[in-house]
Image: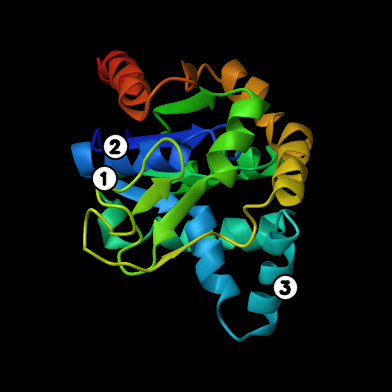
Amino acid sequence: MNKNGLGLHLVLTGAPGCGKGTQARILRDKIAIAHLSTGEMLRAEAEKPTKEGREIKELLDAGSFVTDEMIIQMVSRRIEEDDCKNGFILDGFPRTLPQAEVLEKMLDDKGIILDAVIEIQVPDEIIMERILGRYSCMTCGAGYHDKFQKPKIYGVCDKCGGTNFYRRVDDNRTTVQNRLINYRKLTYPTIPYFEQKKLLKCVDGTGTIDATAKKIDDLLKVVSE
């Protein structure tokens, strides 16, 4: 919570494809706080016809991380917006140990206390299957999967009725392998850091979306007490 005792401020972390984005959206709808996906923010920047946009696009397409400075500035601006006043879920940030250290100082300067860091744990082989099979509706952005989450009617979006779908260009085997290597090298060191701060909570994410959501709910009941 922040220093006034208001809101819930969380980090969802884990390897790419562990389901943190899905779980963040579920939490957003359930407890009405902002979902801050640095991945979505970066992809939006990558679509802009600017020098920075092109640089970000090249890095994302290669499965690499953008610079800490870019991410930190983007997140700092975002949490100042009105929809974050009642709390937020950080999804995809911090990605490195220096980012974790800067996040702590940034939140302290803004009068915000981090309530918990939830790590969703999923083995690499399951992550690969999840990522390579996922796709989204081009109209409303609803997410689907070839195996785990098919539309009720083949080729038709459940939410908006759209019939056009797309797969992210970086959802290929080589890029996913690079992202997992980068995660182990750069992001995983944040786990013991948050554990030392007594903020880390771990969840087994190998089950269904609903099962993982239930485990997160149970954790948050303890955190909120």
Q: Quadrant of residue 186?
A: top right
Which residue shows up at 37% across the image and 40% down it? Answer: 149
Q: Position of residue 223 (x, y in %)?
A: 33, 18
Q: Secondary structure at mark 3?
A: helix
3 or 1: mark nearer the eye: 3
| Residue situated in front as seen by the camera: 37 or 149 | 149
Q: In this picture, is 195 found above or below 39?
A: above
Q: Position of residue 220 (x, y in %)?
A: 31, 21
**Mark 3 packing: few (<14 Cα in 10 Å), some, or many (20+)?**
few
Sequence-wise first label, 2 or 3: 2
Amino acid type of the residue tagged 1 in the rendering:
Ile
Q: Secondary structure at mark 1?
A: loop
Instruction: State how the image is colored.
Output: rainbow
Q: Are marks 1 and 2 in contact (CB under 8 Å)?
A: yes
Sequence-wise first label, 3 or 1: 1
**Mark 1 packing: few (<14 Cα in 10 Å), some, or many (20+)?**
many
Q: Position of residue 23 (x, y in %)?
A: 37, 36
Q: In this picture, is 43 found above or below 83?
A: below
> Which mark, residue 94?
none
Q: CA distance from mark 2 to mark 3?
A: 32 Å
Q: Quadrant of residue 145?
A: top left
**Left or right position of 46 against 109:** right
Residue 15 makes an appearance in the image: no
> Which mark, residue 55?
3
Which residue shows up at 22% across the image and 43% down it? Answer: 29
1 or 2: mark nearer the eye: 2
Amino acid type of the residue tagged 2 in the rendering:
Leu
Return the residue at label 2. 27
Return the residue at label 1. 33
Sequence-wise first label, 1 or 2: 2
